[in-house]
Amino acid sequence: MADQAIAEKGSDYNSGSDNGSLDNQAPIYERPKGIKGIYYHPLTQVVMLGFVCFMGPGLNNALSGLGGGGQLDPTVNANANATLYATFAAAAFFSGSIHNKLGSRLTLLLGTTGYSLYIGSYLAINIHPHAGAFVITAGAILGICAGLLWTAQGSLMLAYATEAQKGTFIGIFWGIFNLGAVVGASVSLGQNIHSTANSVGNGTYIGFLVLTLIGVFIPLTMADPEKMIRTDGTKVTTPRHPSWKVELYGLWITLLTDPMVLLLFPMFFASNWFYTWQFNEYNDVLFNIRARSLNNLVYWLSQIVGSIAIGLLLDQKAISRRIRAFGGWTILFGMVFVVHIWAFFYQKHYTRATNPPDSPDKLDIFSHGYAGRIMLYIFCGLLDAMWQTTAYWLMGAMSNDPAKLAHFTGFYKSIQSAGAAGAWRADGVKVPFMNLFLSTWVLLASGLVFALPMIHLRVKETTDLADETLMRMDDSGKIHDVDEVKATLNQELVREK
């Protein structure tokens, strides 16, 4: 039984290109044909995965992107977000183990429910202004749900792609996911195009709530990951479901045997920190609701462009994977400084004292100077998408094993959310705008500096079986050596032929 389990896990090993993985002894399976083949195509499932996140976190991003969650006073929103990301950080660290125990579809289903509750809480506070405690409680529940959803999402997105497709699959997913924010922003803009007020009405929240409720049911329509075969014929074998003890041991083994992932933690930490300044200290502070809605729309549209563009670059077959990794790093480094030098010249002219939440002097879409400020917001969206896509791509370059990728994405969302919780709490206690802005700049630059040695030492042209420790671990927690696993794979390959 141990040999069979290792053979099944080993069929994931080194899905290197669309030409197959014969050099690595991985069994090659025939993909289904016709309608069934389309449904079970990895790209189809990644598109469906994108729509799961379109309906949940995508719409939630549209709401957050309005600044203050669309409210006149952003304090409740800042405190709710701090609570959300605090529970998100705690839950996500262990959500890889939960995902590997429950399976991807159930984990996705549980994860989507929190978004409906959270958006519903904003409708509640719009109707009952003293419902702030409900919003904060809903944020805490969403944090747990979001940890589950994003861990399942990351594991499936990275495991369904061959090594040659990971950037493209990440870009396509990120584009569809952010299309949810585009639709949400369009709804908000349509609702508020004739408004010069500073907050949104009930209709915007109701529209968002209905769409998130639809999204809850999409995971039920997705294919069983155990039936998925990649485009190169290698089988996507999902993590089996060992005991909780062995699964938590796998979490420890992931860190112990691949410590280079720790060098990505500063990059993870910075990856949501900047939202607080962008959404609340820039978009919410400077613009009325009509301008905020338009800014929000172009921000998420630019995310689609940014994620697909850098995803295609990171998958350029004519360039070695190591050069692509350094190229992606260089683009991010340049974008960080372009965006923040530009933004500094705006930020130095206003403070919390000069621009209170109820200021009547906020910029409108027809105001002088609006064009330059919306262009900066477009570049903020491009940077965000490129940052997140590259972070996922780097994790995908370290492994093809869904169990290990679940842990990696769990670490990513946990550390990311810890950073976001700190940033939103800083906003909630009224830290000066300039302090938050400078901390954003420093954390982004530092994250890239720490990631550089990891790229140099860990990113290789292809993933080796020796790196896939969890793939070589059986249900009892025993880790088999490489030669033993290869011998088992050879036996499996003979049986398949």
Image (spheres, helix red, strand yellow):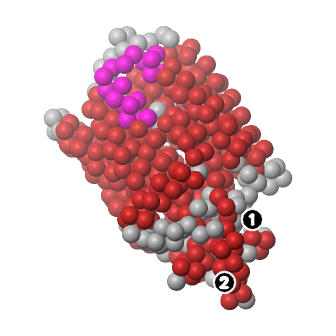
Membership of 432 in magenta stretch: yes
Q: Residue 202, located in which quarter of the rendered image?
A: top left
* Left or right: 31 in relation to 142: right
- Which residue is tagged 2? 492
Q: Which residues are magenta?
A: 419-437
Q: x, y (%) of residue 261?
A: 57, 46
Q: Residue 470, located in which quarter of the rendered image?
A: bottom right
Indicate the amino acid at tag 2. Glu
Select label 2 or label 1 by which is in front: 2
Membership of 227 in magenta stretch: no
Of mark 2 and mark 1, the one earlier in the sequence is 1
Q: Quadrant of the C terminus?
A: bottom right
Q: CA distance from mark 2 to mark 1?
A: 21 Å
Indicate the amino acid at tag 1. Ser
Please name the predominant secondary structure of the magenta segment in the image.
helix
Circle 2: element type: helix
Name the residue rendered at 80%, 55% in the picture.
317
